[in-house]
Image (cartoon, rainbow, N blue to C red):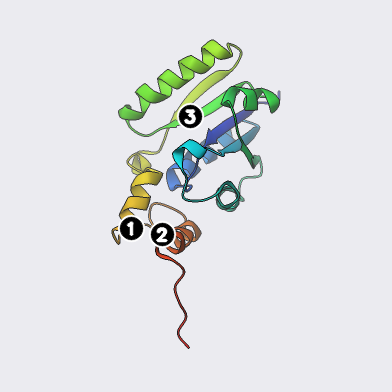
Amino acid sequence: MNRKAVYPGTFDPVTHGHIDIIERASRVFDHVLVGVAHSHDKKPLFNVKERIEMMKEATKHLGNVRVEDFSGLVIDYVRKKESMVIIRGLRMISDFEYEFQMALTNRKLAEDIETIFMMTNESYSYLSSKLIKEALTLGADIKSFVPSFVAKKLKNKLHGKPHRRT
């Protein structure tokens, strides 16, 4: 059986929590497609190309994970990719209400597509991309929240590239 799942999101930027969900999904499914949403409404800090590059780097150790961008309805994207499963990560109980509402809406629009919720590891349950960006702007060290290459890109994006002294 060829079990394929789609994990959609903005991933602005990818966090250890996202990576945890992807790694665990890659053990359950034969193929996991990470769909990086264009998401103009959320006004992401990184453009879609940058987010894809970061996600590819963060998941390069997983042979059954592919990363690409998408726009439009998630259910249309899932169908196009010949999958029947959407993976959604849950951190806290507060995520559940929004995610449940979205899953029910998707089910109404596409009864053949299932949403599977995966709880993130408790050590990442408080992480959010928004919180990480806010913490960095206030001077926090974010290396324990995101891969080191992501922390560097975030710092460069939010604070400008460091100037080399000659």
Q: Are marks 1 and 2 in contact (CB under 8 Å)?
A: yes
- Cα separation between marks 3 and 1: 28 Å
Q: CA distance from mark 2 to mark 3?
A: 28 Å
Query: How many numbered badges does the structure rendering display?
Result: 3
| Residue that mark 2 sits on | 158
- Label 1 sits on a secondary structure element that is helix
Q: Residue 39: horizontal and vertical position, in percent?
A: 52, 37
| Residue of label 3 | 88
Q: Earlier in the sequence, mark 2 or mark 3?
A: 3
Mark earlier in primary sequence (3, 1): 3
The spot of residue 60 in percent (x, y) is 62, 50
Pointer 1 residue? 137
Look at label 2 and name its amino acid.
Leu
Q: CA distance from mark 1 to mark 2?
A: 7 Å
Tell me the amino acid under the disc marked 1. Answer: Thr
Lower position in the chain sequence, tag 1 or tag 2: 1
The quarter of the picture where the N terminus appears is: top right
Residue 104 appears in the picture as rendered: yes
